[in-house]
Image (cartoon, rainbow, N blue to C red):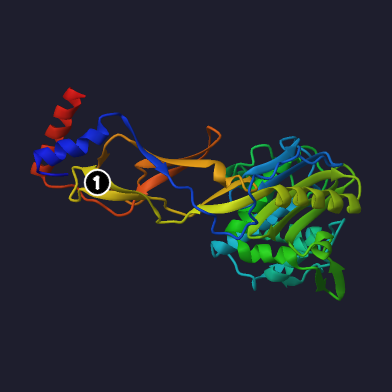
Amino acid sequence: MTNNPAIGALLLLSLLAPIVLAGPVPVPTPTQVIPASTASAPVPAPVELAAKAWILIDAHTGTVLTEHNADEPLPPASLTKLVTDYLIAGEMAAGKFTKDTRIPISVNAWRMGGSRMYVQEGTEVPVEDLLRGIIVQSGNDATVAMAEYIAGTEDAFAQLMNQRAQQLGMTNSHFVNATGWPAEGHLTTARDLSILFRATIHEYPENYRLYSEKYFEYNGIKQPNRNLLLWRDSTVDGGKTGHTEEAGFCLVVSAVRENMRLIAVVMGTNSVEARARETQKLLAYGFRFYETARMYQAGEVLQADVPVWFGKADKVNLTVAEDIYLTLPRNAQKDLKATVVVDGAVEAPLSPTQPVGRLQVEQGGAVVLTVPLVPDREVAEAGWFARLWDHVVLFLTGLFS
């Protein structure tokens, strides 16, 4: 770190305690355009809906704004196709096939009942058309065709669905088929569906855009998207419906207002109209009383000139590796306090991917966000003599402390 004993001793005074608090960090003004007021807007009690279960989350931060029975396993009906689409998008991203790949239609797919795309047995249909058949038309025939192409059989595809669900953290879900056709043990939760739809939005934005399409015509048959909010709310840019007698009427949607994206999941309403109306209530509550702001930019220096031991550089700056967002009640940002915490001495070698501290953001004495802090550059180990000197200084200071 340094070959000067006096300087070394002075620098080490800040490292006598096992945890170094580097003092408050200014909480910045949001970079997003958010209406301001002189006091935080009061947040009323969470909205109550005429549904079995629901959840509302911020799509960027994953923060839950309100929920009810969000972990109760329920039949999802055609919301199951969100999982199927997620797997298809993953296979395409991995280069297994493209949107132009032609998929053979089996007798099994052609014979599927319920909502259909009306593909014909023995024909081959491009993936792009089948995706629209799954997402816009909720076609069970298109869904089975893609499941069979990817996994050989729909049963095998269901195993892939369950594996991917577990990887995503959908811990209360179990899928028996690709379509949502009623089956014993075929269940998921509002929370798990919010996790899935958030992953779709972030990982496969091109696929997500298909959820905004209002109509799709195939084989001379034009069918509308059953998501009524695409017509009623211009901020809603995607979603999926589901309905069976057991599941009731279900809806998953996402909407964007003032650069804030929310995801709403509503399960078990009693009509097409009810699922649209109750979901609108949920979105209105979230957008009215909450905001998501970018607190810090990737690469922004939050603590400058942190001493480095055993390295070719004496100091580094601490920063965040990615943009940091926080979802809070509107205008509550003024009540935040941010602190940089560095645990002990910072020792080389260092990498910009190696956390050496953390940023803690508190509101009213409670920690609402913890983010790793990383060095702004690599620091290689110093030569053997410089490292030996730093060891001596640290040892002697430890005795005195």
Residue 26 at what x, y percent from top left?
Answer: 44, 47
Residue 380 at what x, y percent from top left?
Answer: 21, 50
In this view, the residue in front, 324 or 168, is 324
- Residue 107 in view in this figure: no
Q: Quadrant of the C terminus?
A: top left
Which residue is located at x 22 percent, y 34 percent?
13
In this view, the residue in front, 260 or 207, is 260
Q: Is residue 162 left or right of residue 313?
A: right
Name the quadrant containing residue 89: bottom right
- Residue 202 in view in this figure: yes
Name the quadrant containing residue 65: top right
Above or below for 264 versus 358: below
Which residue is located at x 67 percent, y 60 percent?
149
In this view, the residue in front, 33 or 79, is 33
Q: Is residue 169 left or right of residue 112?
A: left
Name the quadrant containing residue 229: bottom right
In this view, the residue in front, 198 or 84, is 198
Q: Which residue is mark 1?
A: 349
Q: Secondary structure at mark 1?
A: loop
Q: Is residue 117 left or right of residue 341?
A: right
Question: Which amino acid is tagged 1?
Answer: Pro
Residue 389 at what x, y percent from top left?
Answer: 10, 38
Residue 251 at what x, y percent from top left?
Answer: 79, 51
Q: Is residue 388 left or right of residue 279?
A: left
Which residue is located at x 66 percent, y 42 percent?
64
